[in-house]
Amino acid sequence: MSLDQSVLLEESLALAEMVADSSVAIAYRESKYNLEQDVEAQKMIARFAKMKEQYEEVQRFGKYHPDFHTVSTQVRTLKRELDFHENIAQFKKAEKELENLLMECSKIIAYSVSEQIKVPTGNPFFDESSCSGGCGSGGSCGCA
């Protein structure tokens, strides 16, 4: 490992520490802790995981499975309950904010080297800088 790589890794550790100490990361850890301590939320999550397994089984046969409509409706209802549960919603929001911060840091680092570096953003459909379809497709990135 060269001297610049060593310095770069040290600076990366400093950046990681700054991110970990940020208000966004602190809010994430607090919301995660609150979610883990919420017995009702944990029961709902476990129930959803079990229901999701049933849903995946029913999906294999589609509308021809005798429980297709029942299980599909139950999964959607339970998912909606999860989405509106206070601690679950707070955790998801904090998780998304931390993900966005990490994505922005990754973009800044990558694009400081070259605009052509691909940075995984989690959603290629809405990322203006991603080249959907690959180079040569004439996609949104301007490739020809």
Image (cartoon, rainbow, N blue to C red):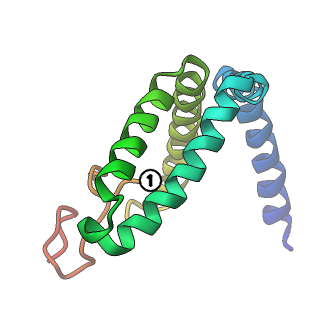
Q: Position of residue 38 (x, y in %)?
A: 73, 22
Which residue is at a point 16% across and 68% down the rendered structure image? 139
Q: What is the quadrant of the N terminus in the image?
A: bottom right
Q: What is the quadrant of the C terminus in the image?
A: bottom left
Judged from the image, the secondary structure of the residue bearing numbered disc 1 is loop
Q: Position of residue 36 (x, y in %)?
A: 76, 30
Q: Quadrant of residue 3?
A: bottom right
**On screen, residue 77 above or below 109:** above
Which residue is at a point 79% across and 65% down the rendered structure image? 5
Q: Residue 62 vs residue 37: left or right? A: left
Q: Looking at this view, is 84 or 129 the one in front?
A: 84
Label 1: how many residues lie within 10 Å, few (<14), some (14-19) or many (20+)? some
Residue underneath mark 1: 121
Q: Position of residue 48 (x, y in %)?
A: 55, 44
Q: Position of residue 88 (x, y in %)?
A: 58, 27
Q: Quadrant of residue 86?
A: top right
